[in-house]
Every structure is written in structure tokens, then in C-alpha cells.
Amino acid sequence: MKKLGIVLALFLVFGSILAACGKKEETVSKETTASKDKSYTIKLANYYAPDHPQNVALLEKFKPLVEEKSGGTLKVEIFENNKLGGEKDFYTAVRNGTVEMGLPGMIMQADVPKMGVIEWPFLLNDFNHAKTVLDGPIGKELTDELAAKHGVHPLVWSANGFRMVSSSKEVASMADFKGLRLRMPNTPVFVKLGQLLGANVSPMPLSEVFTALEQKVVDGQDNPIGVVKSSGFYEVQSHILESRHGFTPNILIINQKFWDKLSDKQRKAIEEAAKEYSDFEWKLSEESYEADKKFLKEKGMKFITPDDKFKKQMADAVQPIYEDYYKEYPWAKEMVEKIKETGK
């Protein structure tokens, strides 16, 4: 009996040792699995100046959160202010995979026309309307073809803002647009918009605008006032027309092949960080308007706020854009109606 007790005791001790070893092996196994995630450095390119809300949000939210949530397996390097080339250059690089991530505007709309709808003139009422549209089913529909056609995976929408005209002379009526040499982005909707307003349009990338204004190649340009501030256009411009003639978003994208080779944990880290960056950036962009306006006024810029009559004249002048697109794209009218309905 005594021997049996000793055997049982030894059996229990041996069993405990085996169980402990099993748990240790399980823990080591989990740790080993976690550590199997390959490490990557992500290059993220954009065209904004360092103090623009986009780069503030990328630096304060996206970069640290990705690095933290990925357990240090992902590092983010932000290349702002066209350091990796203008929008077309870095967007092509993300498509090719030589740059992992980018923050373009709607440059892809030439091949994915639905992406451009959000910039059509006088379509969105305010920031809340824009965010509701882009963060909902419509925003997803706009990006449905992006991966298949361009090989980039869309993550989140963010805000550049409502576009206005800054110029070296006053633009306070439709007559003032006549003969105005106006820089516009090299996208059909903005080129047409400027022409319908009566301006002589010069399409060019953002990276060339300051020099063109300084050398008086153009009299004015259109952008949200955050860009006027961060890009220093106030040094070579005197007036801003608060036309709010269109809204421009940005979209955070990642090369699809790079995305596919990330682990589930790494993809989740990027998605969660992107969401927090986006919410923060929308808030910064909206709240910064009055501060940017105050700053620009202190720099000597004069603001012209159009009355209802002038606003209507501008909106009526650009209606042919809608008529042309309705004829060209069967989905266009329904899409515009859905966007308008969301704003009611």
C-alpha cells in the first residue's frame, strides 16, 4: 500500500511536469508564430507640405499606430512635399510597387471615372456631407474598380477640402474670370470647370504652381486654403475667392501585392491605424479653416465671399459638365442623385 502511494505520487508529479512543459511549449509556439511576421519598412508618399493637416495626421496617428499595433514589424517612413515626385510619379510608383503607399487625390479618375464624381462642381454641401458620402456605401462603390484596374488597395478617404480661387487680382464677379490665367489640376473636370467660368486654363501639377505664380505664368490657382497656407502661395497672391466650387478628397492606398503578402495582424494594424488617421485628419481639416483664413489675412490676403447671386451664376455656368457626363456614363445621374440625397 505504501509502495502504491509512492507510485501515485510520482505519477502526479510526472504529470504536472508534462503539463507544465506542454504549456511552456504552447507559449513558445505562440511567441514563435507571432515573431514569424516579416519586418517591412513602408514608404508613404504625398504632395503636401509638412504642416498640412494630412502630414500632421500621418505623423501623429498613422505612423505611430501602425508601428505599435504591428508589434514593431512594420515601420513607416513618410515622404511629404513631393519628395518622391509629383502625384503622377508617386501614384505610378505605388502601382508598380516601388513605393508601398501613397496619398493621392483623384488622379486615377481617367481610368476609373467613378472616382472623379466626388469632385464634380457644387455637388457637396459641407464637410459632414462629404464624410458621410465617402465613409458610406457610395465611397466604397467609388473604389470598387481600383484594385482590379490599378493594382492598389484602397484603405480610407480623407479630406483636402473645398476648393477656392486664389489670385494676384480681385475676382469678385463672373466678368473677372474673363481672361484670368488660371492653373487647374490636369483632370478633365477641373480644366472644363475653369473654361466654363471664363478663365484661360493652364493645367499643371501642384509641385509647379508656386514657381508659375511667382513668375506670373499664371494669375491664379484653385485649391483649398490649407494648401494656399502650407505651400506659401500667400507670398505671391493677394486675393482669395471663397467659391467652394468643388470638394477634393484624398485616398490612402497601398500596393495590392504588398498588401497580400502581409500577415493578418499586420493588415489589421494598418486598417485600424488608417481609420484613426482618417477621422483625425477630417477633424483637423474642418477645424483649421478659420485659423488658416486668419493666418492668410494677417499675411495681407483679401477674402471675397460671393453672394447667392454670384454663387448661382458660377453653378449655372458649369452645368454643361453634368450634361456631358450624363450622356457619357449611364450610371452618372443616379450616382449624383444619391450623393445629393445623402446631403439632405
Image: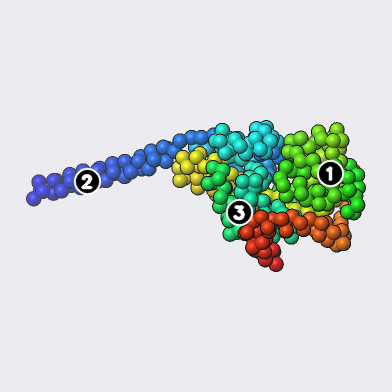
Q: If you read the primary sequence from the N terminus, does the residue marked by circle 2 or circle 3 appear first?
A: 2
- Specify the quadrant of the image occupied by residue 57: top right
Q: Residues within 10 Å of mark 2 (few under 14, many from 20)?
A: few
How far apart are the two marked residues, 3 and 1, measured between alpha carbons? 31 Å
Circles 3 and 1, Cβ within 8 Å, touching? The answer is no
Name the residue carrying label 1.
200
Q: If you read the primary sequence from the N terminus, does the residue marked by circle 1 or circle 2 appear first?
A: 2
Q: Residues within 10 Å of mark 1 (few under 14, many from 20)?
A: many
Circle 3: element type: helix
Q: Residues within 10 Å of mark 3 (few under 14, many from 20)?
A: some
Circle 1: element type: strand
Q: Return the x and y of residue 291 as percentages of the image width and height.
A: 80, 49
Q: Return the x and y of residue 263 as percentages of the image width and height.
A: 45, 42
Identity of the amino acid at label 2?
Gly
Name the residue carrying label 3.
142
Identity of the amino acid at label 3?
Leu
Q: Is residue 294 above or below residue 74?
A: below
Choose between 327 and 26: the one closer to the eye.
Answer: 327
Residue 302 appears in view:
no
* The label number, if any, that marks residue 15 in the structure image: 2
